[in-house]
Amino acid sequence: MSTRKEPPKVLKGAAYTECSPISDVSHHKASASKAFLENHYRGMLRDTRSGNTARPVGPRPREPCVDDFVLVKRIGKGAFGEVYLCYKKYDNDKQLYALKRMRKTDMIRKKQISHVRSEKDVMAEAASTNPWVVKLYLSFQDEQYLYMVMEYMPGGDMISWLCIKQRFDVESTRFYIAELCAAVASVHDMFFVHRDIKPDNILLDAKGHIKLTDFGLSKRFAKVGEELLDLEEGNDALCSSNSSANLSNTYGSTCQGPNSVPVVSPHNPHSPTANYNSLTPAGSHASAHPQARRIFESIVGSPGYIAPEILMRQRYGVNCDWWSVGVIMYEMLYGIPPFFSSDTSSTCHKITHWREYLTYPSDRGVPPEATDLLRRLMCDQRDRLDFQGVKEHPFFNDIDWERLRETPPAFVPELSDPLDTHYFPEVEDNTPHQHHQRPEERNAVREVDPRGVIFADYKFNLKR
């Protein structure tokens, strides 16, 4: 008597094989449909609470397209697309925006779909209420590209200012770390954890105040009592072989190709066990357990700024962002990142063994209250300060937290005219190019997504 053969078990998000009942593309479509419905009903709930339930009367507005904009200058170029300085046609004031254009085929092939969706979702929610996040005005698509029209930040990113200044004085550090802490806390208040706080993702406006960008690695939480619960299931796309924090970076190093960050084994830290971008989140199969759902176990972030509990594949929560704040503060005061090394593997080893390598040289003029704050940010995650603890720390005694954005900033960008982009790295051949859709790329997108499901929830318009 023959025994019944059990069907093969297939892990969530697993690559398609002959015996797999679902492919990666199908999984992305299911995720996109889920996200579309969640965003739709979240918007309905928001409108109901605000009393804005009336349906518009009249013809349906025309959907935006790239031909609505005049592309002035390319300010970012990389593996996944370009960023342009632009303004709207027929706008007499010629208000400047940053337009990011990303190829759909690259997003699908390199498994960046969840990153793009995460960035759009966070920026859309923040657009009308959060002054600490780069404002998103529009997101739309055509057959070949995804587009984001965002606030233009002419002061460039914080990494550029670190290169210019080499070291910040204590007062400048105090101001910008206070703003950074307020910005990080504002993202947490939206029930998101950023997971990739670094100087590249801190942008300066024309007045010198900061805003956060690059939410491609962010994750949504729901708050229940005083605990944070992970609403999302494990997602392979976060750790795909081509995932990169630079994918979503708004300007400067925008859309650069991926950087490999090794995962360090606590048992053999000198030998990376694997590239973190190719790992399946450790919590993918344990997320059903109530305790396991409270914190993340996926490997994300950028070398040098990533918290040790993430590198060591331990459970972690929103306080991973506060470690990154401490690393940036250290770099401002000492002129070098605390775990700097010539190779990524050595950097990761230093981070996971931070008790051995984290030093505070006494000859740099850093005041004791500053080093004390650093020790309370770059420490074991159980001892790390939260935002309330940060605000109460003596280093910030003179900070008016309620009027930060009204306080004169430490640095004010010197701009010769509105089109001055010298705070951004030079882009070879920065002349705007009008891209015509190539038939093979158009067909490639249609082949995997004939009904346009994967990016169905991508549309956003701040004015509607």
Image (cartoon, rainbow, N blue to C red):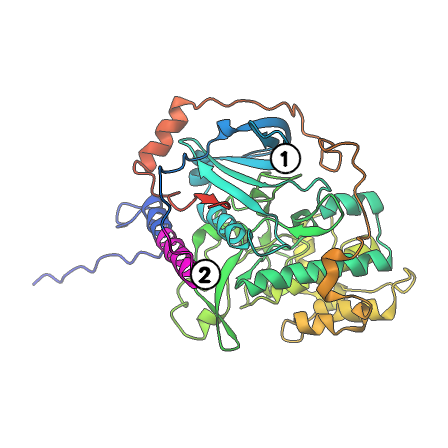
The residue under the point 35% across, 54% down is 37
Label 1 crowd (10 A; few <14 / some 14-19 / many >=20): few
Q: Nearer the viewer, mark 1 or mark 2?
A: 2
The residue under the point 13% across, 63% down is 3
The percent position of residue 385, horizontal first and vertical second, equals: 68, 72
The percent position of residue 90, horizontal first and vertical second, equals: 56, 27
The percent position of residue 237, horizontal first and vertical second, equals: 45, 50
Measured Cα–Cα span from mark 1 to mark 2: 30 Å
The verdict on residue 383 being magenta is no
**Number of the label disc, if any, that sits on residue 95:** 1
Mark positioned earlier in the residue sequence (1 or 2) = 2
Furthest-left residue in view? 1
Amino acid type at image mark 1: Gln
- Please state which of residues 197 and 457 is positioned toward the viewer in this rendering: 457
- Please state which of residues 70 and 16 is positioned toward the viewer in this rendering: 70
**Number of the label disc, if any, that sits on residue 50:** 2
Q: Which residues are magenta?
A: 34-54
Label 2 crowd (10 A; few <14 / some 14-19 / many >=20): few
Amino acid type at image mark 2: Ser
